[in-house]
Image (cartoon, rainbow, N blue to C red):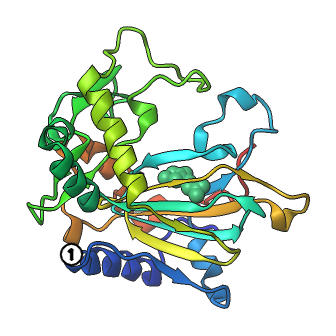
């Protein structure tokens, strides 16, 4: 397996295809089978090793993806996300996916105010991309390239205090209003109603439009052997041509992640091949 920080053309083309295809259709989840092992090297180009590391040091401080607990619906920081399932869990760990447009349609027919609340620029997110304690922006925004299509950009950890996290929400940061908390719950329940659940098998690959699909996973239990230890490689891919810029507040974060680096800047920069303990 190679670990150089480059994005091979095959993967760049995949990001492009997913973005362009999902202009037409609600969403596409592409699964490839385990015979495509020649793609191993390409997909290993990223440091997103998703594994339960809670038995390593300081288990209480592990961020949610690196535990074996449920991950509620959220988006990552990318236009397209790729996942390569090195090993699936013998028990649980299914991926769950739901279309943001379908969720918003459901909310709009239940109570149109919910969509308005989600689209208002007053949600208090911690960890601003440009520093400071918090900033405000919307949870759902209209696509900059397809104005009627809603896109989502959020994860609950940035909006709600989590007693299990090592970075607790500072007390001076505003909490969600009652209406925001209600809208976030309603979003989650609507997503569950439309969810596509994927029971991963080792060797599966999946690429999806991270701006138009929210994702999560069920809790899982690993088995005894390495092959029964759930391990997913996660890629974040940018595709400005089809997706356009994210909401203005997130542009600095996207730029930092997807800035084009010259060959010399890359140097012998390597992605870690093992999950960090
Ligand atoms: O473990 C999974 O299936 C997904 C992990 C995930 O969503 C993340 O790390 O952002
Ligand atoms: Fe994620």
**Spot occupied by residue 190 in the image (x, y as percentages of width and height):** 34, 51
**Which residue, as the protein is rendered here, is positioned at the far bottom?**
35
Q: Is residue 256 above or below residue 7?
A: above
> On the rendered structure, is 57 left or right of 13?
right
- Mark 1 packing: few (<14 Cα in 10 Å), some, or many (20+)? some
Q: Is residue 39 above or below residue 261?
A: below
Picture quarter with the C terminus: top right
> On the rendered structure, is 174 left or right of 200?
left
Residue sitting at 82 percent across and 39 percent down? Answer: 55
**Spot occupied by residue 192 in the image (x, y as percentages of width and height):** 43, 53
Residue sitting at 83 percent across and 68 percent down? Answer: 227
Q: Which residue is mark 1?
A: 23
Q: Nearer the viewer, residue 69 or 87?
A: 69
- Check disc 1 and report its element: helix, strand or loop: helix
**Which residue, as the protein is rendered here, is positioned at the far left?**
147
Q: Is residue 21 above or below residue 256?
A: below
| Residue 245 visible in this rendered orientation of the protein | no
Residue sitting at 34 percent across and 62 percent down? Answer: 260
């Amino acid at each position: 397996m190679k670990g150089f920080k480059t994005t091979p053309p095959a993967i760049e083309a995949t990001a492009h295809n997913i973005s362009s295809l999902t202009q037409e259709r609600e969403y596409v989840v592409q699964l490839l089978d385990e015979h495509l092992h020649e793609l191993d090297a390409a997909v290993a180009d990223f440091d997103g090793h998703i594994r339960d590391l809670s038995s390593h040091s300081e288990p209480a401080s592990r961020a949610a993806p690196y535990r074996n607990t449920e991950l509620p619906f959220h988006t990552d920081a990318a236009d397209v996300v790729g996942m390569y399932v090195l090993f699936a869990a013998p028990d649980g760990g299914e991926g769950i996916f739901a279309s943001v447009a379908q969720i918003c349609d459901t909310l709009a027919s239940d109570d149109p105010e919910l969509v308005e609340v989600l689209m208002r620029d007053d949600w208090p997110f911690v960890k601003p991309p440009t520093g400071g304690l918090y900033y405000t922006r919307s949870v759902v925004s209209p696509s900059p390239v397809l104005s009627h299509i809603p896109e989502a950009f959020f994860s609950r950890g940035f909006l709600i205090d989590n007693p299990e996290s090592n970075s607790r929400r500072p007390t001076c940061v505003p909490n969600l209003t009652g209406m925001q908390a209600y809208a976030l719950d309603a979003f989650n329940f609507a997503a569950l109603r439309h969810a596509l659940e994927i029971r991963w098998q080792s060797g599966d690959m999946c690429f999806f439009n991270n701006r138009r699909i929210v994702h999560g996973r069920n809790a899982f239990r690993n088995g005894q052997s390495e092959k029964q230890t759930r391990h997913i490689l996660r890629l974040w891919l940018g595709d400005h041509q089809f997706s356009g810029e994210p909401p203005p507040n997130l542009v600095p974060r996207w730029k930092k992640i997807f800035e084009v680096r010259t060959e010399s800047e890359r140097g012998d920069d390597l992605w870690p091949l093992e999950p960090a303990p």
